[in-house]
Image (cartoon, coloured by chain):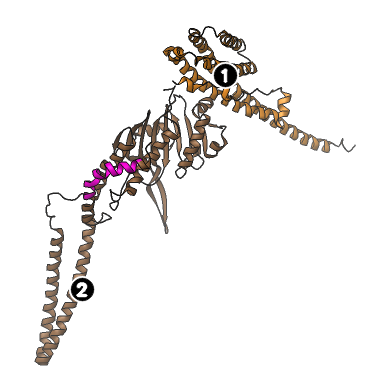
Chain colours: A orange, B brown
Amino acid sequence: VFLLDPFILFFFGIIGGFVLLVVAVFSANEYNKLVERRNAVNKVFSDVEALLKKRYDLIPNLVTAVKQYASHEESVFEEIARLRNQFHATLESIPDQISIEDQIHPVLSRLFVLVENYPELKASDHFLHLQKTLVELEEQISAGRRAYNATVSQYNNLVEMVPSNLIATLFRFSIYPWFRAQSDETTLPAIALAE
Amino acid sequence: MKSIDQFKAYFESDLKPKFASLEQERLRTIQKYGRNGLSGSPADKDFAIQILTVVYLIFCGYLFMFLLILMGIIIDAYFSEWIVGRVREIVFYTGAILYIVLAFILYSFFIRLLNRPEPKIPNPPLTPQEYYQAFNETCIVAIAEFVFDQFYYERQGMIEPADYQTCQLFRKTYDAYSGQDYFFGKLGETDIEFCELNVTREETVIVRRDNSTSIEKVNRPVYRGLFIKLDFHKNFNGQLFLIPEKTWLQRDGIGRVELIKLEDPEFEKYFKVYGTDQIEARYLLSYSMMENLTEFYRKFSDNPPHLSFVDSQLFIALPQYKNMFETQLQDSLLDFDAMKVHFINMTDILSIIDLLNLNTRIWSK
């Protein structure tokens, strides 16, 4: 009887409405933050992808140049061709591309170690030009990976931390994968190319 | 980069003989103008005349009184009272007139003596201003010849205002732009330009004195200090600004671009980074570059450096309030310690090229 009192109902109605409003505003704010961060990740990744495309367009020229002197090193060339095809086949998927990116580095590194055995190749102007372009691109890609990781870190924090994780779960925001840090073995041996 | 020991050897073997004649000039200038270079100035002469006049008049006054007393004693001793009274009056008035006439004659003589034209000597000593100019054109140039591979120096020159505006570190407009000690040089593969800048703007302020208020115009500094322009070893299209935590700049002026958070916590402790592109910012600020910049900041932490990367160039502003390439009349040109300061100033600036590794340009540019 007490709860049916119109004044009490009105009072709880006001309080409930206010709480709902606060929750709605908070949820919208968190949702917007998540969308903003996710867009930032996609934007940075599209910039990185443009750089990766440039590199994959350059690789066939590089392989052709190396093949002229080291045609019997088939396994490296095949591996590079396979990864390049995979890259073009998975252009829309960030996790797949990151996985390919993590594989291509050691292979490219092997290619450059191999070049050390062919002094004529190292002296070729055409090859040197390709190397110079590739190393420059690698520097830009490396910067892109760092920028991507920084943006992903901010986004993933929002997805995983309380209270924004509630909204993230509700609207199915999933975490993004990271680029792995490049170890010394997987970076290109630039000093050897400098000669 | 040349070391201080190499400079000492160069100073002993080459610079000392080269500076010997200017050192003689310095001593002659001191002889004429004093160690502070101020004696012999017109203001000095006026002061001397005033002092001499006062001293002279006091001296004459005493002399006059002494003569009066002496004459009084003589007259009292030999003449009657009436005559004594008349003679006293005559002597007093005549003496007073004589004193005034004499004072005037001697005063004009003093003035004529002090204003007489300087005797023309065949090789007059340099004025302090001429000496300072000769110092920069001889000594600073000789030290720069030792430090740079190639260089151009202009004492009254400065970096073009267009470059100052290109760097975009200073958002405030300015009314007066002046500079000095302009160097343009090359060290290894890197072109470097630097000068001391003094940029001011006129501001209207309300001044309250006692019970009245007035509106006055004052010159406020926009920037004062060393301004450096370097050819950066990587090409880039965007803009990047590195503003130290301790800055005189208004941060809202830089708010037009994005704040970029980087991965090096030590670097982040010293600089706030603003830029137009997240990827390009990291392309320019590689891990090694951030370490180098941290080292650079520590070296110049007294004048926290402000950096901007614009149009494939690097601009550095090091605010400070002293003139770096100037000398004093009392500083001997044959004293290694006095000359060493200029060498250290120059090498400190050029060390930026090594610190930031700007000469390593294997692939780009």
Q: Which residue corresponds to mark 1?
A: A46
Mark 1 is on which residue type? Ser
Q: Position of residue B74 (x, y in %)?
A: 11, 88
What is the crowding at mark 1: few (fewer than 14 residues within 10 Å), some, or many (at least 20)? Answer: some
* Point 33% across, 33% down: residue: B184
Q: Which residues are magenta?
A: B6-25
Q: Chain letter of disc 2?
A: B
Reply yes or no: does residue B58 show up in magenta.
Answer: no
Q: Which residue corresponds to mark 2?
A: B58
Closer to viewer: mark 2 or mark 1: 1
Q: Position of residue B340 (x, y in %)?
A: 35, 45
Q: Position of residue B289 (x, y in %)?
A: 49, 31
Which of the 4 quarters of the picture holds residue A43? top right
Contact check, label 2 and label 1, Cβ < 8 Å:
no
Mark 2 is on which residue type? Ile
Dots 2 and 1 on the same chain: no
